[in-house]
Image (spheres, rainbow, N blue to C red):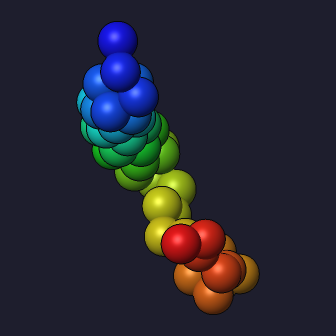
Amino acid sequence: MGSVDVVDSELVRLRAELERLRAENVRLSRLLELRGLDTAPAPEQLSAAVAA
């Protein structure tokens, strides 16, 4: 397997993990909403730096 194949397979794996985490976030937000809790991000999360 060449280095491009390794990078491609890692990219596929990371995209699948990202999708799984997004779906989990939606599920957890819905559970919080059902309990009447706020699901909006905290102000410090909105202003946090994002790595490139």
Would residue 20 be seen by someone viewing this image from the given angle? Answer: no
In screen coordinates, is 27 left or right of 42? left
Nearer to me, 32 or 22: 22
The percent position of residue 3, horizontal first and vertical second, equals: 41, 28
The percent position of residue 34, horizontal first and vertical second, equals: 38, 43
The residue positioned farthest toward the front in the image shown: 2
Quadrant where the N terminus sits is: top left
Specify the quadrant of the image occupied by residue 49: bottom right
In screen coordinates, is 10 left or right of 23? right
Nearer to me, 4 or 15: 4
In screen coordinates, is 6 left or right of 8? right
The answer to whether 41 is drawn above or below residue 5 in the figure is below
The percent position of residue 43, horizontal first and vertical second, equals: 64, 84
Residue drawn at x 57%, y 82% as measured from the top left: 46
The total number of labels drawn is 0
The percent position of residue 16, horizontal first and vertical second, equals: 30, 29
Residue drawn at x 67%, y 80% as measured from the top left: 48
Would residue 5 be seen by someone viewing this image from the given angle? Answer: yes
The residue positioned farthest toward the right in the image shown: 44
The answer to whether 34 is drawn above or below residue 44 in the figure is above
Specify the quadrant of the image occupied by residue 7: top left
Nearer to me, 39 or 46: 46
Residue drawn at x 61%, y 71% as measured from the top left: 51
Specify the quadrant of the image occupied by residue 25: top left
